[in-house]
Image (spheres, rainbow, N blue to C red):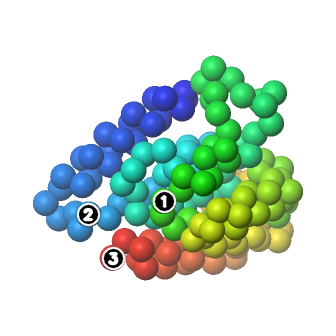
Amino acid sequence: MPDATVMGDCQSALNYLKALPNCNGKVGIIGTCSGGRHAFLVACKIPGFTALVDCWGGNVVMPKDRLTEQQPVAPFDFTGDLPCPMLGIFGNDDQSPSPEQVDQHEEELKKHGKNFEFHRYDGAGHGFWYYHRSIYRPEQAMDAWEKTLTFFEKHLA
């Protein structure tokens, strides 16, 4: 999915949600895998999101040789623009993002004084919430879900 398409879709979704009569004006964004990458990019570039959860978003940190027409920027480059609190959920056995990339992202968030918390799980790799696949890790997934729901309640209630 091209970044530009995702950005437009998320802007439309944000507008729609904020126009609902029962919306308190706060809207969160969450994504897993490439959706985590997109959620981070969207939160950095589209004003109006109140909280962000990135679940093992691969290619947030991207070397220049991985950039494409559909993904022309590394979301990491916009870390300084992130206006809302962020929760990051990562498996230590993952390679996209690798633990080193998660470290790099964490250092960049610290450098810019961002409000964030990262949780990393031993024995978990990419997609450890996906209960229908062999990569599912129930203990780590339940803990991460609890942290996610608590984070959203804190920032969106």
In percent of the image, x 64 and y 27: which residue is there? 72
Please name whichever residue, 90 or 39, is drawn nearer the observer in this view of the structure.
39
Q: What residue sits 75% from the left and 39% below the top?
A: 62
Q: Position of residue 61 (x, y in %)?
A: 74, 46
| Residue 103 appearing in the image | yes
- Which of the 4 quarters of the picture holds residue 56? bottom right
C-alpha span from label 2 to label 1: 15 Å
Residue 90 point in image, percent of width and height: 72, 63
Name the spot of residue 79 as percent of width and height, x first. 62, 53
Identify the mark nearer the N-term, 2 or 1.
2
Q: Mark 2: which amino acid?
A: Gly
Q: Could you tell me residue 139's position as x and y percent?
A: 69, 76
What amino acid type is highlighted by mark number 1?
Pro
Q: Is residue 95 above or below residue 71?
A: below
Please name the residue that numbered disc 1 is placed on.
Answer: 83
Q: Is residue 132 left or right of residue 103?
A: left
> Of circles 2 and 1, which is in front?
1
Q: State the residue at coordinates (60%, 24%).
A: 70
Packing grade of label 1 (10 A; few <14, some 14-19, many >=20) is some
Tag 3 residue? 157
Q: Please tell me whether mark 1 sits on a helix, a strand or a loop.
A: loop
Residue at (61, 47) in percent of width and height: 78
Tag 2 near tag 1, CB within 8 Å: no
Residue denoted by label 2: 25
Q: Nearer the viewer, mark 3 or mark 2?
A: 2
| Of the pair 11 and 134, the residue shown nearer to us | 11
